[in-house]
Image (cartoon, rainbow, N blue to C red):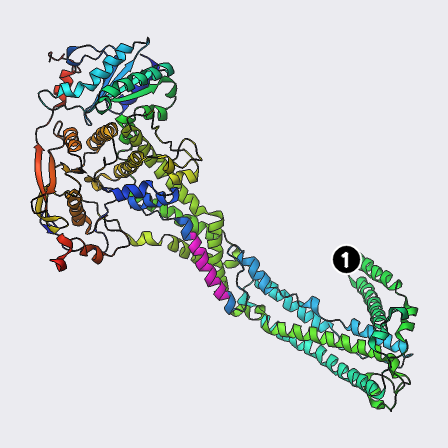
Amino acid sequence: MSDPQAAILGRLEELGFRIRLDGFTPFGEALPIVSAVAWDVRTAQLALIAEMEQDDESAWRQLLFAASGLRHNLSKETPSAFGTPVVLAIVDDRQEEQLRQIAEDIAQRYLLFTRVDLNLVNRGRLKNKDQLDDALAPLLPRCRDLLGKDISRAEISAFWAELEREVKATAAGLDPIFRDFRTSAGEAASASLTECEEQNSELPAPAPVSRLRLSEFRSIQETEVAFRAVTIVHGPNGGGKSSILEGLELDWAGTSSRKPSGVAADEYARHLPRNGGPTSR
Amino acid sequence: VIADGRTTTEVAVRPKAELGRSVLTHEAVAALVSQSPEERYLALVATAGLEIPDIGKRIDDLVSETKAKADRALESAGMAALPRRNRPAIAHLEECLDSSFAKRLPRNEDVEAIEQTLASATNGRFHGRAWPITHGALEALVRADGLARRLVSSKTDPRQLPSAAAFDDALQRLEELSDARREARSRIDALITGVRTASRPVHTSQQLSDPDEGIPVGLAVRWLSHAESLQSGAEGFVREAKGLRDQNWAALLVTYAQALQKAVEVVPQAELTRASRAPSAYVEPRQEINPQLFRDAGFDGPISDPAQVLAHLEALSNVLAAQLRDLDELANELQTHPARTYGDHAAEVLEALCNFELARTLKLRSPTANASEAIVSKLLQGRLAPAVRELVAAMVRFEWYFKPLIVPEQGRTVVLAGLATSQSDLDARLLLNSAERTVLGLSWFLALHLLQVPERRRVLVLDDPTAAFDGPNEAGFISTLRAFVRLLRPEQVVVSTHNDSTAGLLVEQLAPVDGWPVDASRVRVQRDAHDASVATEAWVSFESASLATDERLLGLMDDPAPLH
């Protein structure tokens, strides 16, 4: 196994991917250029690691065609569980150039890049963990690591505590001529610098909504939407998609991001009823 | 709006929930991408709801606010306002309270010197006055100066210092000096008036100052008296040097006295004495001058040629007038100087100056900026930036025409920018097309969403995120979104799109796999015959795809898959 491949597989294993090293045989047909396969159950992502010592243009073409047809072939009877396959092609500078040309050539004739996520991993650019993670970006290595390392309220509070400490220390270091005023000045300054923080408590985040009923709202006379775990809302411009999302925002926050900051709540509310408000009806 | 039984009929003035990290609208994308680095940082913070305010601006405000208060306190204590925002408070206070009264006390010697020249010009018929000694006044002023200096010290409490009493004492001493001078001057002036009234002027002052006639009388008198004053000063110093215990200081004072002596030696005494008796500007008196005027002025009786010493008398009157002015000024200052009543205002002034000095120091040394930088670096550099960078790279399919933007490791300005190009002098905003901007905005948003506590990321809503994308970018975004939501597994995902085929792609990619999500649907919203918008659930998927099936088909199970 080459060093780049070992590094990639090591990282993917660390991230919880399953690894298969003894060749890739989709639908029983061997794809020799794929030296390892990695897949993750949680995200249902599939990564094909391809590497080649000799130049073989047809092998690369075969790989790109096979990978781009993968989901189509998987979904013949039931929907495909895997997402768009991620191809990690480990290349040197010359192969990188060659593979680009092949990819562009195929892309001109087929919808290649909507069906395969091709990533050129240059052997020379895998010197550290950052470069490795850059190469693995579609598999979200950093997001996986960062999950659970949330930027929480507690951390911000720690920041304010640190700020307060520094302000008070600075006050204590002022000329002794100021005597006890140094303490009160430190308290006043840190209070003034951290003022807003004290007042604001965190607003709740939105919670799921399963049924939304809108009446006489924007372009809607009366309609009801059932929201599932995943809901794709679509329709032509002016059809009312955004009004439905705005309805969700109004339920959650009582206001919406469509209200410009300079417009008063009343004024904004006046524009929400269907046909421009009750006065015109 | 009725959602799960909750009815909303009014718009709230303040939001009841924080949507910035859960609901992405085009407005939010624009705010995240289109602004200057500084603005973007603030927009990010606002969007993040993290409330890390602009500490720099707050400190600036604090400096302005505390300076205004300090200026008011200084004003009520009779002192000048701080000249600028970065003026050290203590230095300003010292400057305001500095008195230096003692060195401005007029000297008896300056008067006595003129008296001496007048005495010699009249062959001893004039006798100088016994001036009240200045030592007492000098000491009182030195004490006042010392007290004023001690007002600005950490060792003494200004409220305890008797500065007003010391100032009053000095004032009283100055009055004695002034009274004697005022009286002497009025007598000298009475004689001058008497002499002028009794005599007829024959020359104008210009004629008297004719350079051909040598040195003018007035100047000769001034020079002589000055030399006289130097002489007596030098002699006095030599005497005082003998009383000094410190030999170094004694030697220095003697050297200085000798230098004065040398200066006196170059004075052409004889010529000046002659010149000072130059022909009078007045002819002989036409009438008698009251002899009492002479005696009051210090002569032992009327002199035969009073016009000849008129210049001396005028010089004496002038120096007395100048000293009276100086004394008046000094007395006036003793009465109004802020140091006099500083003790009464000290608490108020020190408190206000302390607040100002703290704000000024915070601005100057900015430990708060360090604290702020530390958290910005920890949150932005350590967590947010890597996630943004990764999401940008993941979404963009053709890495060779849109390289992932580089997030620099260090440097505060760039940290605030959040994102920069590989060339630090280029502004990322100006390089991006609308698809790239959208990618960037989406990445910021998703990264912020990711870095929340799990209970705050139950819902993810994206309003038409693919509007600016072409096919490959759209595919890149959708497969990244798929991996992202499967990784986070929010309870509810809502994505809107104007494009029907995009909707198909989204629902297919986000459909259930191995039980997550539970279900996925496509809701079509369009206008009906009455031009009213109507939402219809167009397609629902409950059936879960099975990863095990795919694994088998792809030969990933240990048990080889049957041929398809």
Q: Residue at x 18, y 19 (%)?
A: A70
x and y percent of residue B201 in the render? 85, 83
Is A39 rendered above or below residue A153?
above
> Is any atom of residue A273 visible in this view?
no
In this rendering, would B524 be left or right of B24?
Answer: left
x and y percent of residue B344 in the render? 52, 70
In this rendering, would B213 be left or right of B458?
Answer: right
Q: Residue at x 87, y 85 (%)?
A: B300
x and y percent of residue B469 in the render? 25, 33
Residue A123: name its quadrant: top left
- Given residues A93 and A133, the one toward you in this image is A93
Is A168 rendered above or below residue B476?
below
Which residue is tagged 1? B249
For mark 1, name the chain.
B
Q: Residue at x 49, y 63 (%)?
A: B71
Q: Which residues are magenta?
A: B59-73
In this rendering, would A127 be left or right of B365?
Answer: left
x and y percent of residue B441 in the render? 29, 38
Whether the magenta-drawn stretch holds residue B264 is answered as no
In this rendering, would B21 be left or right of B314?
Answer: left
Is B116 rendered above or below residue B304?
above
Q: Quick one: label 1, few (<14), some, or many (20+) residues within 10 Å?
A: few
Secondary structure of the residue carrying tag 1 is helix
